[in-house]
């Protein structure tokens, strides 16, 4: 009975122990599962956040190298020197292998070459990231671009191989079923790596979990979430972080199936011990022992992860370091120590002023005590190395809080070589400008499609243009005489069409009060434009050859003068022969009767003198003088009648204005010449016209002005430019009593005469003026008339370039 009772008690005790053990095991397993799950999630969150942050910095470092290349290429492209731009592009592609297909683009290029690139250029000056996209050779890339600086000028772009991101992710070796991916702001997949590795798939797709979309809506810059991955269906604890300054986010996920393995082992062990009815002490000992083992394994995993993160810091090429609010160095990588030329022992716990030389201690303390958690800073500085050399750096900093401690994480990039290159470039540009100025050589480039000109400073000086001007081709051509413009236009067209070099000597001026001669050399420059085919440009140099040309001209002046005198003598001889022939014909028709009348008047005058009749003699003398005037005017009309009767345009040639005015004034009576005053309101020295016809027209206006002005009063010849139409204005201004109102509408018609002009000609003078100007394509105008005087204008238009 006792045995049975003890058995019952034993059974009861065992049953109680079994029940108690079952209750304890069930309770412990449920609670343990929750505890393990929470611990696993906490560990995954911490690890994933750290990895995401490190990866974001690594991705940012990769992109920054390409961005620096884009900035340098854009700076070179803004110079407008294609050769220098090509050299810079080749150097950058060698020094920055990540920058594939580095190129210079503009808005028109971008619209045809890269969809979406042109729209991205309408924003601020920042790094533009587009993609991902698959190239024709099957390679996946993203496009990086830098818009035009200030919204004008060239832009730059490059392609970045996605395989570089995949290689970076593969180096993490997270183990288990972890996954690391890189996505755009629109969630397009850029790169992805899993453990174990899987074939590349899903690039460019936007398939993702609902939990990620919800997390991004709350915290777009960084955060965590738990979800099953859309691409493989594996549940992971994920963390994401934006790559600074880009539309990219790094996502790191660790599978929960890996983190819950210890709990499954604990459950199997506990159930096995319960089923075998092991002693409570032994079971407790085993459970305690296994618990200690699990703690040790967790500590080992955390140490391994810490070492892995330290390794990631070491692999970053730029100087990463962490400061507290007192300016003491908390953590740094080997690259930072190498940048300062110091050992880790020298820098451990050192103060920032050990190497900072750009800012004072008070300025540094102000920043350290005022930065906010999450605040981002960017600035340039100078660090002092252990050997005393100064290093130019670009610094990016972010305020963070770790274990209730405010820290400032700083990323320092060595800019010494970049600044040295910039200084060399500036010195090279200054040398080129100085050399061109000393040698008297200027460069130019013409966009044949739009007529835009690009000129160096020396070229603008040689052409007499303002230093800050950006002239078009037509404005440059206006600096040349009209006879040379057509030759220049034709020469440029031939260069653009055939590609053959061409040169010409051109007069220009006056520049600095002196007429100059320039030797212009041109050749075609072909530049590939994927949007519109070949964009043809013509480039060349201009050189001042005034002294050489003037020396040659002086040697030829004597010969040219002899030829001109001989030509004038021949022309005058021919004109005299024609005049004599015409006068011989007119002698029988008009002049002979006039001569007979004059002889009769003289005979009558002699007879009256003999008989002593002095009252009629003066009248006969006046009649004889009038008859002489009629004969002189008839001679003038006959001399030009055949010339004015033609219908074609006047035969123009470059004529010296001063010579035209001097010859015309010399045609006036000697007593009247001193009354003529010339006023210049133009720099023009030559004009294209028929000198003989223009001399006749100007002589008629000048003769009328002298005749109808008060004796001794001035008659002004004013020269001025005409803008619409382009040409020259010759104004004749007198101080007479004006023209009769009834005569003004018919002033330039043949036979038009006023009632107050006794003894006037037969209305041919102003008619001849009008015909001369019509033959020149210009006009004769009455600008003003009245009691104070009359202003007559001759408008000589420029010859058309066509």
Image: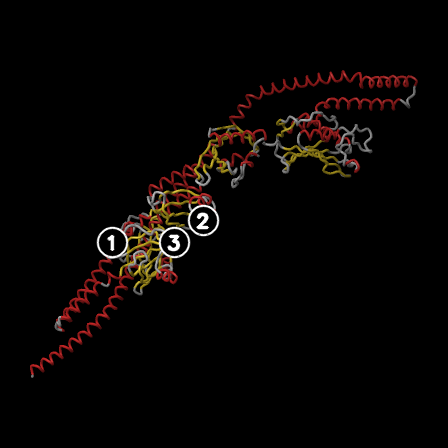
Determine contact: label 1, label 2, CB under 8 Å. Answer: no
Residue with the mark numbered 2: 121
Residue drawn at 77 percent across, 16 percent down: 585
**Cα gap from disc 3 to disc 2, whole angstroms:** 15 Å
Q: Quadrant of residue 755?
A: top right
Q: Which mark is residue 196?
A: 1
**Cα gap from disc 1 to disc 2, whole angstroms:** 41 Å
Mark toward the start of the polypeptide (3 vs 1) = 1
Give residue 726's position: percent from left, percent from top.
62, 35
Determine contact: label 3, label 2, CB under 8 Å. Answer: no
- In the figure, is residue 705 to the left or right of 82? right
Give residue 471's position: percent from left, percent from top.
53, 39
User: In the structure shown, which secondary structural element does the residue marked by tag 3 occupy?
Assistant: loop
Residue with the mark numbered 3: 247
User: In the structure shown, which secondary structural element does the residue marked by tag 2 occupy?
Assistant: loop
Asked whether the viewer can see residue 334, the reply is no
Mark toward the start of the polypeptide (1 vs 2) = 2
């Amino acid at each position: 009975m006792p045995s049975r009772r003890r058995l019952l008690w034993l059974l009861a005790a065992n049953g109680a122990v079994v029940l108690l053990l079952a209750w304890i095991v069930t309770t412990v397993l449920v609670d343990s599962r929750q505890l393990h799950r929470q611990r696993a999630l906490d560990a995954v969150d911490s690890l994933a956040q750290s990895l995401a942050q490190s990866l974001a910095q690594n991705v940012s470092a990769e992109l920054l190298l390409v961005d620096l290349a884009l900035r340098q290429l854009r700076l070179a492209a803004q110079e407008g020197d294609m050769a220098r731009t090509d050299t810079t592009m080749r150097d950058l592609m060698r020094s920055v292998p990540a920058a594939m297909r580095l190129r210079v683009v503009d808005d028109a290029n971008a619209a045809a070459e890269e969809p979406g690139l042109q729209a991205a250029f309408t924003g601020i000056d920042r790094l533009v990231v587009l993609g991902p996209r698959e190239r024709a050779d099957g390679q996946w890339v993203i496009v990086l671009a830098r818009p035009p600086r200030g919204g004008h000028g060239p832009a730059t772009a490059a392609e970045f191989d996605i395989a570089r991101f995949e290689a970076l992710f593969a180096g993490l070796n997270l183990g288990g079923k972890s996954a690391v991916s890189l996505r755009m702001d629109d969630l397009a997949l850029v790169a992805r790596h899993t453990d174990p590795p899987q074939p590349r798939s899903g690039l460019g797709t936007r398939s993702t979990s609902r939990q990620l979309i919800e997390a991004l809506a709350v915290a777009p810059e960084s955060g965590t979430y738990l979800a099953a991955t859309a691409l493989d269906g594996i549940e992971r604890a994920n963390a994401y972080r934006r790559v600074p300054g880009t539309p990219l986010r790094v996502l790191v996920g660790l599978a929960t199936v890996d983190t819950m393995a210890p709990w499954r082992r604990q459950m199997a062990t506990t159930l096995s011990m319960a089923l075998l009815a092991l002693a409570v002490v032994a079971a407790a000992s085993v459970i305690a022992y296994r618990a200690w083992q699990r703690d040790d394994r967790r500590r080992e995993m955390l140490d391994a992860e810490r070492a892995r993160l330290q390794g990631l810091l070491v692999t970053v090429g730029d100087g990463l370091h962490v400061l507290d609010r007192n300016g003491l160095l908390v953590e740094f990588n080997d690259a930072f120590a190498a940048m300062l030329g110091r050992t880790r022992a020298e820098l451990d716990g050192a103060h920032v002023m050990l190497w900072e030389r750009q800012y004072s201690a008070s300025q540094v303390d102000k920043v350290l005590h005022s930065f906010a958690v999450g605040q981002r800073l960017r600035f340039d500085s100078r660090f002092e190395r252990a050997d005393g050399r100064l290093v130019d750096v670009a610094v990016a900093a972010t305020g963070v809080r770790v274990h209730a401690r405010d820290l400032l994480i700083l990323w320092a990039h060595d800019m010494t070589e970049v600044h040295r290159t910039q200084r060399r470039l500036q010195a090279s540009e200054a040398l080129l400008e100085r050399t061109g100025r000393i040698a008297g050589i200027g460069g130019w480039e013409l966009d044949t499609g739009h007529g835009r000109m690009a000129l160096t400073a020396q070229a603008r000086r040689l052409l007499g243009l303002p230093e800050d001007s950006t002239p078009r081709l037509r404005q440059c051509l206006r600096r040349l005489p009209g006879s040379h413009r057509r030759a220049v236009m034709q020469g440029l067209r031939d260069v653009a069409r055939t590609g053959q070099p061409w040169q010409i000597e051109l007069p220009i001026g006056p520049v600095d009060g002196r007429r100059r001669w320039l030797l212009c050399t041109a050749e075609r420059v072909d530049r590939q434009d994927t949007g519109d085919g070949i964009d043809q440009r013509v480039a060349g140099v201009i050189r001042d050859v005034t002294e050489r040309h003037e020396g040659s001209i002086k040697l030829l002046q004597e010969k040219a003068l002899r030829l001109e005198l001989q030509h004038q003598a021949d022309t005058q001889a021919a004109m005299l022969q024609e005049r004599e022939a015409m006068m011989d014909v007119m002698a029988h028709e008009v002049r002979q009767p006039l001569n007979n009348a004059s002889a009769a008047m003289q005979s009558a005058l002699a007879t009256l003198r003999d008989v002593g009749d002095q009252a009629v003699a003066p009248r006969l003398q006046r009649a004889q003088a009038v008859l002489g005037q009629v004969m002189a005017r008839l001679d003038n009309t006959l001399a030009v009648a055949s010339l004015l009767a033609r219908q074609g345009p006047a035969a123009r040639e470059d004529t010296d204005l001063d010579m035209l005015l001097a010859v015309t004034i010399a045609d006036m009576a000697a007593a009247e010449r001193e009354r003529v005053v010339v006023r210049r309101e133009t720099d023009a020295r030559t004009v294209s016209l028929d000198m003989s016809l223009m001399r006749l027209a100007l002589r008629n206006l000048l003769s009328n002005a002298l005749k109808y002005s008060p004796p001794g009063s001035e008659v002004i010849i004013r020269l001025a430019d005409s803008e619409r139409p382009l040409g020259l204005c010759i104004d004749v201004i007198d101080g007479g009593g004006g023209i009769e109102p009834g005569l003004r509408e018919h002033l330039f018609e043949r036979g038009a005469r006023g009632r107050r002009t006794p003894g006037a000609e037969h209305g041919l003078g102003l008619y001849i003026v009008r015909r001369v100007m019509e033959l020149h394509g210009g006009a004769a105008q009455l600008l003003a008339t009245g009691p104070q005087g009359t202003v007559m204008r001759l408008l000589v238009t420029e010859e058309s370039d066509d």
